[in-house]
Amino acid sequence: MSAHAHNDNDFLFKYIFSTDHKMIAKQFFLTGSIMGLVGMLMSTFFRLQLGYPGTSFPFLEAIMPNWAPDGVLSPDKYLALVTLHGTIMVFFLLTAGLSGTFSNLLIPLQLGARDMASGFMNMLSYWFFFLSSCVMMASLFVEGGPASGGWTIYPPLSALPEAIPGSGMGMTLWIVSMALFIVSSLLGSLNYIVTVFNLRTKGMTMTRMPLTIWAFLITAVLGVLSFPVLFSAVLLLFFDRSFGTSFYLSDIYIAGQALEVEGGSPILYEHLFWFLGHPEVYIILLPALGITSEVVATNSRKPIFGYRAMIGSILAIAFISFLVWGHHMFITGMNPFLGAVFTFTTLLVAIPSAVKVFNYLTTLWKGNIRFTTAMLFAIGLVSTFITGGLTGIILGDSALDINVHDTYFVVAHFHIVMGLSGTFGMISGIYHWFPKLFGRMMNKNLGYLHFWLTIVSAYGVFFPMHFLGLAGVPRRYYANTEFPIFDNLVDINELVTVFAILAAAAQGLFIFNVFYSIFFGPKAPQNPWKATTLEWTAPVEHLHGNWPGEIPEVHRWAYDYSKPGAEEDFIPQTVPLAEGEEDSSH
Amino acid sequence: MLNLLILIAIVVGIIAIGKVIRVMELSSSIKGENSWLASDKDHRTQSRLMLVFLFAYFIFIIWQIVEWGDEVLPVSASEHGVIIDNLMTTTWVIITPVFILTHILLFYFAWKYAYRSDRKATFFAHNNKLELLWTAVPAIVLLILILYGLSIWNETMEPLTAEDDPVEIELYARQFDWTARYPGEDKNFGDVSVRHIEGVNMLGMDSTDQNGWDDKYVKAEFYLPVDKPVQFYFRAQDVIHSAYMPHFRAQMNCVPGMVTRFNFVPTITTDEMKEITGDPEFEYYLLCNKICGAAHYNMKMVIKVVGEQEYNDWLNEQKVFLAVEGLQEEAPVETEMPSEESDSSNTEMDETELSAQL
Ligand code: HEM
Ligand SMILES: [Cu+2]
Ligand SMILES: [Cu+2]
C-alpha cells in the first residue's frame, strides 16, 4: 500500500484524525509529554514552598496572581498543585503517555501487523485522551481552583465543596476528565489485546513475542479489569456530589450545619479506588520494564536471561496486583486479620520482582554492552526499581506501615519505584525508538548529559525524603514549620528543592534534543541498534500498512544476540532457523 | 524589561546549543563516523562513569546517614513501638545487603562488560538452577519476614480487655483541630451525634445522656499516664483525618460515620524524653496525617506523658461537660453518677458503629 491520491483533506486525516498507529503513537507521545511537563513544573512550584516556606517568589505571583498572593503559594492551592501533579504524572504521563506511545507504536510493528485491529477505535482512544487532558487543564482556571483532595480524591473531602474550594467545579471537572480518560484507556487496551491475540504474523507464536509485547498485553489486561472499577467509584462520588445520595457519606457536620447524609462509608470508596489504584502502579511499571528488557538485551548483545521466567513474573505480578489493594488501608480501622492477609499477598510481589532484577543483572553479565542513551536509562531503571522496591518491603508490612503510612517515606518509595522507574523506562524507550517514531537520530552527547544530570538529581530529590519520613513528616503538608519536632529538617527540605529544580532543568535538555532531532537530527538508518525484532525490518519512512509488499514471516524468538556460530552478533527474527538449529525460547 | 532580557538570553542560548550540536555532527560525519553511535571513547567514559556513580551513590547515602541519622524519630515511647522498631531494624538488616550487592553487581557489570569490538557477548539464555535459586531464596526470606511481621502486627492490634483497666480517651478530629475526651468518673462516654452539635457543644454530646455529664474534654494538649494501657477511640466530624502519634508508633484514621480504635502503653514521660533527646523544649505531638483541607499541615495537639499522680491531678482540674456547657439548669437535678454499668472495657459507643469498622 503506498500513498493515496492527494486532496485537501489529506493534512487533516494524516496528522489530526489519523487512524495510523504510528501517527497515534506520536500524538500520545506529544500530548502526554506536554502534560508531564506541566506536572513537573507544578512540582517545582510546590517544592519551592516546601524548601523555602513563606519566602516570596514574585514570579509565582506573576504566573498565578490569585494562587500566590505576594509570591507565596496559598495552602489550599498548594494542595491543588499536589493533586494535579499526582493525577497528571500517574495517569496522563505514565499511563496514557507511556502505554499510548509504545503500545501503539510497537504492538503492530513488533508483531508484524499492518495496523491495530481497529484503527478507528484507536483514533477515538487518542481523542478521548486529548479531551480528557483539555478538561483537566481547564479545571485549573475555574472558580475555586482544580481538585485539591490529593490524587486519590477521598471523600468526604472531595465530595463537599465546603471542605476545600477545589471540591467545587474543579472536582466535577476532575471526575469528567477521568471518565473520558477511562473511556480512552479502555478503547486503547481492548484494541491492544485483540491485536496481540489476532494479528500476529506467521510464525510469531506467543513465546516468540518480544517481552515488550508481553508487558503491553498484560498491562492492557490490567487496565481493562481495573479502570471500570475506578469508573464506578467516581460515578458514585458524582452522585453523592450532585444528586444528594450518600454512598460515601455519613454523620457529617460541616460549615455550621449537620448534613442529611446517613449510612454511607468513605471506606467503600477507598476499597473501590485502590482496586484500581494498585494495579495502576503496575500499569505504569510493566511497560517500563518491558522496554527495559528490550533495551538491555539489544545493547548487551545478549539474549534476555530467563525469557520464560520473565513472562512468568509479569503474569505473577499482574495476578497478585489484584489481591493487594488493602495495603493502602492498613490503618483505616480495617479488621486486623484482613490486614494480615494483605501483608501476606503484598510481600509475595517481591518474589517475581526479585526474579526480574536478577535476570537483568545476569543479562548484563558477560555482555558486550553498548552505552546508548537508551541503555543508560535502562540501567538507571534497574537501579531505581531496586532502590524503591526494597522499601516496599517495609511499607507492605502492616506492622511497620503503622508508623510510616502517609509520611514522606511513602513519597520517597513510590516516586523512586514508580515515578523514576516509569519515567526512566519511557525516556529510554524514546531514545531507543526515536528513529522509528521520527525517522531521525537523537543527539548522543546531549543524551549522556541528560542521563547523568537526571539520575543524580532524581536521587538527590527522593533519597533524602526517606529521612523526612522516618522523622515522622506527613505528606501533603504545606509546610513543616508548625511542629517544633520538624525544625531541624529545614536543610533536608532545602536540598531536595535545589535538586528538584536541577532535575526539572535537566529535562530541558531532553525536550530540546527531541525537538531539535525531529527537524535536524541525522537521518536514521533502518536498523541503527542492530536489533532482531520486526520493527527494524520496516522502512524508515512511515508507510500506511508498515511494510511494502509482504509482511515478514517470523522464524525464531526475539533474542538471538551473539548466538554461537552466527556471523553477526544478532540474527533477526525473520531469518529461518538453520539446519539443526533450535529456537532458543525453549 | 529584565524578563525580556532573560527571555532573549534563553532563546540565544538555545540557538547556540543548536549550532554547537550541528558543528559537532558535521565534524564527525566528515571523519566518517556516525555521530549518534556510541564510539569507543564513549564506551570508555560511560563505563567509568558507571563505577563513579556507584561510589558516589553509596557515599551520598552514607553522608545522609551521618548528617541526618539523628533527625529520625527517637526511641519509641510506647511498649509495642519497641518491637515494631526491632522489626524495622531486622528489615533494614535484610534489605540493605541486597541493595548493596545488587547495586555493586549492576554497575560493576556495566563497567566490566563495556563494549569492545574484539569481544563477543556470551550466549546465555537461561539456567533453571540459577532461576530456581533466586526464586526460592527471596521466597524463604520473605516468608520469614511475613511471619515475623504478622506476629508483631497481631500483638500490636490486640484489643484490650477489662483486666487491662485501660485509660480511655476519645480523639475527635475536625477541620482543623483536635479534641480529646475523657469519660469521667463513671468511665462511660456519653452519646454523641452530629445532630447535637451546636454552639459550645462542638462534640455533639447528647445532654440527655447522663453518661456524658461527667465527660471531660480538652483542646491543645492532653495527658497520658505513663506505663498504663491507653485505649483510644477516634471519630471525625467532617472529612477523614488521621491521628498520628509518631513517637508512639501509633496511627489510626478518623473517619466520619464510624469509630476506630488503637491502644498502646506509653513508657517514657515527656520529661524523660527531654533528656533522651537532649532537647529541653521537646514535646510529643498528635498530628493529622490524612489530607483534610487547607490547614491540614497545622492540626496539632501536644501530648503530655506524666506520672500517675500528676495525671490524676491534671484530670481533676478539668471541668466536666455539664459545667462547661452551662447546662445545669435544664438537666435533672440529681447529678449522681450511674455506677451500675461502669464496665471499663466497654464504652457507650453504639455497637453497630463499632462493627462498621470490620
Ligand atoms: C521533578 C520530579 C518530581 C518532583 C520534584 C516531585 C515531587 C513531589 C512531592 C514533593 C510530592 C509530595 C507533595 C506533598 O505530599 O505535599 C509529590 C507528590 C506526588 N507525586 Fe511527584 N514529583 C516528581 C515527579 C513525579 C513523577 C514522575 C510521578 C509519577 C508517578 C509523580 C507522582 C506523584 C504522586 C502520585 C504524588 C502524590 C500526590 C498526592 O499526594 O496526591 N511525581 N511529588
Ligand atoms: Cu498498592
Ligand atoms: Cu486533619
Image (spheres, coloured by chain):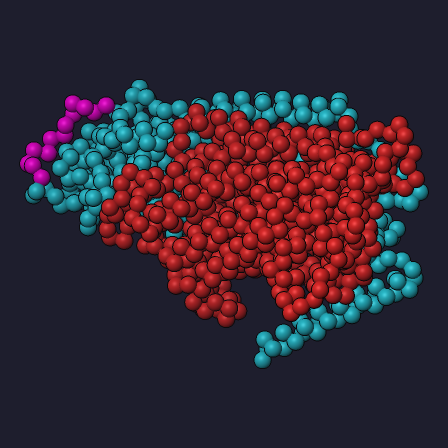
Chain colours: A red, B cyan
Residue A39, how many percent across, how many down? 55, 56
Q: Residue at x 53, y 23 (%)?
A: B148
Residue B135, how many percent across, how many down? 67, 25
Q: Residue at x 51, y 39 (%)?
A: A226
A501 over A476 or under it: above or below: below
State left or right for residue B340 relative to residue B308.
left
Q: Quadrant of the C terminus of chain B?
A: top left
Q: Residue at x 88, y 65 (%)?
A: B27
Q: Residue at x 66, y 54 (%)?
A: A20
Residue B338 is a magenta residue: yes
Name which quarter of the figure residue A231 lies in: top left
Q: Quadrant of the N terminus of chain B?
A: bottom right
Q: Tell which of A152 and A385 is nearer to you.
A: A152
Q: Tell which of B101 and A551 is nearer to you.
A: A551
Q: Magenta stretch mostly in which secondary structure? A: loop
Residue at the far front in the pictured view: A5
Name which quarter of the figure residue A173 lies in: bottom left
State left or right for residue B231 relative to residue A35.
left
State left or right for residue A8 relative to residue B249.
right
Name which quarter of the figure residue B216 lies in: top left
Residue A334 is a magenta residue: no
Q: Mark yes or no: residue B57 visible.
A: no
Q: Which residues are magenta?
A: B331-343
Residue A575, how many percent across, how many down? 85, 39
